[in-house]
Image: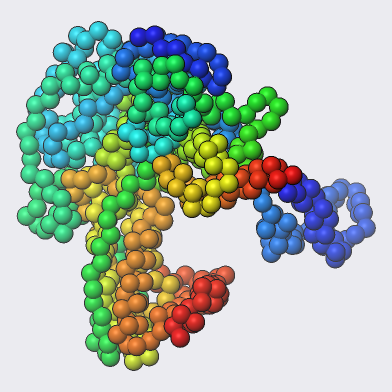
Amino acid sequence: MLIELRVNGELRSADVPPETTLLKMLREHLDLPGTKLGCDVGDCGTCTVIVDGVSVNSCLLLAGRAKGSEVTTIEGLANSNTLHPLQQKFEEYGALQCGFCGPGMLMSAKNLLDNNPTPTVYEVRDALAGNLCRCTGYTKIIEAVVDVSRDMKAESDA
Amino acid sequence: MVTRTTDIQTEEDQLIPSQESKAPSSQPLSVLGGNPVLYPLELPQSDTRTSTPAVGQRATRPDGRLHGLGQTQYIDDISFPHMLHAKILRSEYPHARIVNIDTSEAEKMPGVIATITGAEVPENTFGPTYQDQPVLAYPIARHLGDGVAAVAATTEQLATEALEKIKVEYEPLTPVFDPLEAIEDDSPKIHGESNIYTSKIIKKGDVEKALKDSPHVFHRQYKTQMVEHVPLEPQATIASWDGNGRVTIWSSLGRITLGREDISRTLAIPQSRIRLIGTIVGGNFGGKNEIRNEPIVALLSKKSRRPVKCVFTRDEEFTSSTIRHPFIMDYTTGVNDEGLILARKIRLVLDGGAYCSWTGTTIGKGSILAPGPYNIENVFVEAYAVYTNKTTTGAMRGFGAPQVCFAYESQMDEIAHKLGIDPLEIRLKNGFSENSLSPTSQTLQSVALKESLNQASDRFGWKEWKA
């Protein structure tokens, strides 16, 4: 079936078998392997992307259901001049070790800050609760997200 | 934030030792026919051994940028033209003799290019300590995670469907799951004559006499459970067998030199014909320290003459990769009225699962650390690793250290409670200090145990909490 959707601002389409998940479509049909497959059952969150303003496990969403949607993946965070502030802070804080959870973790964090620019630590933890990381113990990740929101607040106050 | 390079550069100058060079002579010396180069024979004195500008500084990971951009290439992000996808059929029984495997129906499916069974593996055994593990089980399957056949097809889904068409005839054998049952003489045997495949004894002093003389003797059994590493990246391999008779394998393996030995053994080709590329690993924690599906994928590539990729499902990661050894630990400890440990007698039974894997390292480290970081004159440790028809246990962070720590620290608390001694006090009383002897009589250096305990308890307010 032909699926047309907007990925990272660009109109993309692919002819995929009906059982194809959004994750498979992104990775295998649209050549965007940044989004990872960890468990394929919606537990680990490493496949998180933003679909129409909502962070979703792309391994659970059929590509057909995302038809016509606006999808943002890890490949759409930075531009050719600058990293996204979250990418910058994750790097500075050493928030990623093996890095496999990174793309999903960053998309969940981005979605949180898009909807709530000044989250409490509790809200950060809550927003990342669906993203598992086995290396870091989460501390650096949470610190990095809080730091980004602090910077954003300082910028908007200025 | 200041960057790392500038920090190091400014501090580096101060680190250069102020004393004169330790060379035998500061004068350039030239003797005809002699050695024109003068040099001291002592190790260079360097302040970096005690202090370095890196400590206390925030260093950025060299790979952090790519991780954040989603550009790090893990195996599943690599693909090749005409690449096939492999899936492995797992055993239906925890213990069974495989009578027959019929792959013909699967092979007839369009899109299925190759199948393989254990009988086709040139040397169907591998393992880092004992070579007791089959690439694909044949003729005996020893746990539910054992692979019995594999398929390479044009898509992952076709390969999964093809597994259902493979007919395997089993003759079920009696399984054994409890390691204490497996130790008995009349238990079903998993490999050979005995299920005990490794043991270790550590003796120091006379534990029986010391226990008899101890005013208080404590006994308890402690158990720990299986733990899976759960790396977020499942085990993955790509193999490509080329027209030169060489095979290139991309693997998420953490130990590629050891892996190449095992692959060479199982494929029965020299190591010079194997190129093993360790890719960036999405989490290891010990679970990717030995080969897993590499020979299967290589042989499927040989048969199909195409690159073949195999990525474990999350289920397979739990059942078919290794896990942490569950321990059953019997601790008997004799103490005096002041809480000083006089003797400790320990029996460890390691549930090894179906194959040995890294049990040798685990039983060694577990046994040596079993008495705990305490000065004990009389120690006896006996440890046995036992085969059961369960998931293979292998390397995992700590190699047996966390299991025994749970036991000895639990018992320290019990002793402190019964004798009315502060739990911190009893540890300070018995704990290792500089030049203490380990249970295997190694002199210990740089021992900061008591300082660490004192600092930690001060910081979290132990005394205030007790008051």
Q: In the drawing, does residue B377 fall left or right of residue B278?
A: left
Q: How many marks?
A: 0
Does B357 appear above or below A104? below
Q: Residue at x 86, y 48 (%)?
A: B36
Nearest the camera: B80 or A65?
A65
Q: In the drawing, does residue B361 fall left or right of residue A52?
A: left
Q: Quadrant of residue B246?
A: top left
Report the coloring of the rendering: rainbow
Residue B451, horizontal then vertical, whole percent: 55, 76
In the image, farthest residue toward the front: A157
Q: In the drawing, does residue A132 fall left or right of residue B445?
A: left
Q: Residue at x 53, y 38 (%)?
A: A115
Does B77 appear above or below B324? above
Nearest the camera: B51 or B228?
B228
Q: Residue at x 36, y 17 (%)?
A: A64
Answer whether residue B240 is visible to the viewer in this image: no
Answer whether residue B224 is visible to the viewer in this image: yes
Q: Quadrant of residue B70?
A: top right
Nearest the camera: A114 or B147?
A114
Residue B362, horizontal then vertical, whole percent: 35, 55
Residue A73, horizontal then vertical, whole percent: 51, 27
Q: Residue at x 26, y 27 (%)?
A: B88
Residue B2, horizontal then vertical, whole percent: 75, 49
Nearest the camera: B356 or B397?
B397
Q: Quadrant of the C terminus of chain B?
A: bottom left
